[in-house]
Amino acid sequence: MAQIAPGTNYPPQDHPSGYYFSYENGRYLSEYQVNYDHRRRGHYENSLGQMKIAPGSLVITCPGEWHRYRPLKSSGWKEHYVGFAGVFAEQIFAGPWFAQKDRWLNLGHREDVLDSYCKIFQCIQQEKPGYQQVAAGIVMRLLGHIVSIDKQKGYKGKRIEKVIQNACFAIRENLQESIDFEEFARENGMGYSYFRKMFKKYMGMPPVQYHLDLKVHRAKEMLMNTDKSIKEISYELGFKSIYYFSRIFKSKQGVSPSEIRKMLGGNPF
């Protein structure tokens, strides 16, 4: 994050050395970069064309892509940006949404998106054990937010949006419980197939997987921030066995619960 005052030349002299560029020449990056702010105004240009940056604009820059941008000199801006690279990033950007979408879109004012940037910044500043893995997880969540926000635009004000939001609330409030989503759909006057289809389109995954994902994220928080054993965490979150929990956790996080604990220097069990 960086505050660019009105009337300031851009980029400023204290711009990070690895990212410094002249507006006249532009630059190339060896990483993906996602820039967002709900208040900034300026200009962005790449090989695909030019755009005016308005409040709520989000811009994605890909590795090896020539680009340049700057704020309106009369207003300046507060930059929120994150850069990342690696196999997971390449897989995500090869997916259908990122491959087909324009690399600039307007999200409007989104506290959840700003919160992700702030948490990434704090995580890297504090450099606690395992901070790289935590920051990478928040980046993945940020990208998920971006996709979800864009997909939700066609639901605004419709009854199904409220039903899905109620389902998400019920899931969060009952993470440790099993939920009968067929019964939930009936109670809301719709067939389960339709509810599941619309939920998946809205949230990017079926309700059962969404429930499981939240359990795993909660488990990760508990592994990192409590002294509870892996067995205690697995049963507290309603997993049938510690073996099932470990298998699901590793499939979604890429590392096992015990490996997370080892990274943090704690008891792996």
Image: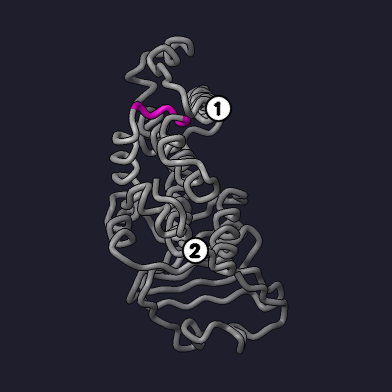
Please state which of residues 24 and 198 is positioned toward the viewer in this rendering: 198
Tell me: residue 239, above or below residue 142: above
Answer whether residue 237 is magenta in the image: yes
Q: Quadrant of the C terminus?
A: top left
Picture coordinates of residue 248, whole percent (x, y): 31, 39
The residue carrying mark 1 is 173
Residue at the image point whose x is 62% and y is 67% from the top = 41
Name the quadrant containing residue 84: bottom left
**Mark linked to residue 129:** 2
Residue 192: % across, % down: 36, 17
Residue at image location 43% in from the left, 30% down from the top: 235
Q: Report the front residue among 91 and 226.
A: 226
Sequence order check, earlier mark of 2 and 1: 2
- Say which of marks 2 and 1 sits in front: 2
Residue type of the residue flagged with mark 1: Glu
The magenta stretch is 236-240
- Report the magenta stretch's main SS: loop
Q: Position of residue 63 (x, y in %)?
A: 34, 72
User: Residue 114 location in percent, x, y?
Assistant: 59, 55
Q: Is residue 224 above or below residue 155?
A: below
Query: Is disc 1 surrounded by few (<14), some (14 to 19) or many (20+) residues within 10 Å?
Result: few
